[in-house]
Image (cartoon, coloured by chain):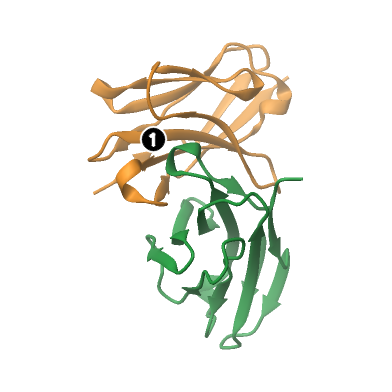
Chain colours: A green, B orange
Amino acid sequence: EAQVTQNPRYLITVTGKKLTVTCSQNMNHEYMSWYRQDPGLGLRQIYYSMNVEVTDKGDVPEGYKVSRKEKRNFPLILESPSPNQTSLYFCASSFRTGQGYTFGSGTRLTVV
Amino acid sequence: AQSVTQPDIHITVSEGASLELRCNYSYGATPYLFWYVQSPGQGLQLLLKYFSGDTLVQGIKGFEAEFKRSQSSFNLRKPSVHWSDAAEYFCAVGADNQGGKLIFGQGTELSVKP
């Protein structure tokens, strides 16, 4: 089944403890992206990648890192999480710009 | 600056009534436009997209949208709403020269009355 898989689905962590949210797609898509969703703010793009080793900042990149070493994987790294990063995170992938993104099921992160 | 505006935060319609959700965008390039739906506790599903050609596009679940360049709008419509359409709807805009950048509106929550 064609899909975007992100793990974990739920995560509670403490301030300052480094964490990684994994994302993998099995559709051979060129583009991948991370979004966060907060009530009243819609989805805001954190980072996106156009291909292996090619990434760019979205609208809210502060406090996040990404890497694209393989085409199928695009992990999101929080080096020192803070409570304002408590959010619902979505990974997405796309074959090309005009196709639109296919989204994963989301990761609900709580930082205490 | 690039932006997407969904003026209506919450809309309530009766089952069987028609629906129109508004979306306005501000984008320098020729835009790609999308509508997504998010059911409670779920991810986002693509309803329809426009990137060229016919300005009236058909999507899944009986939805359609019309691109009006002169009004910078891409409104979503459905002639007869079903209770299962209750969800949050997001408009999004991108462009060919913007790589993977895709900007979303704040969303419109749709409630359906029996």
Comparing A8 with B21, the one in front is A8
Question: Going 66% across and 64% down the picture, which residue do you hit?
Answer: A108
Question: Going 72% across and 23% down the picture, which residue do you hit?
Answer: B83
Q: Give the image quarter of residue A63.
A: bottom left
Residue A39 x, y percent position in the rendering = 53, 53
Residue A41 x, y percent position in the rendering = 46, 52
Question: Going 64% across and 63% down the picture, which residue do you hit?
Answer: A23
Q: Is residue B53 above or below residue B3?
A: above
Packing grade of label 1 (10 A; few <14, some 14-19, many >=20) is many
> Which of the image's four quarters has the C terminus of chain B?
top right
What residue is shown with label 1?
B32
Count of labels in the image: 1
* Residue B7 in view here: no
* Residue B47 in view here: yes
Left or right placement of residue A42 versus residue A18 in this view: left
Comparing B33 with B100, the one in front is B100
Residue that extends furthest to the bottom in the rendered view of this protein: A16
Name the kind of residue labelled 1 in the image.
Tyr
Q: In this view, does B73 lie above or below B25?
A: above
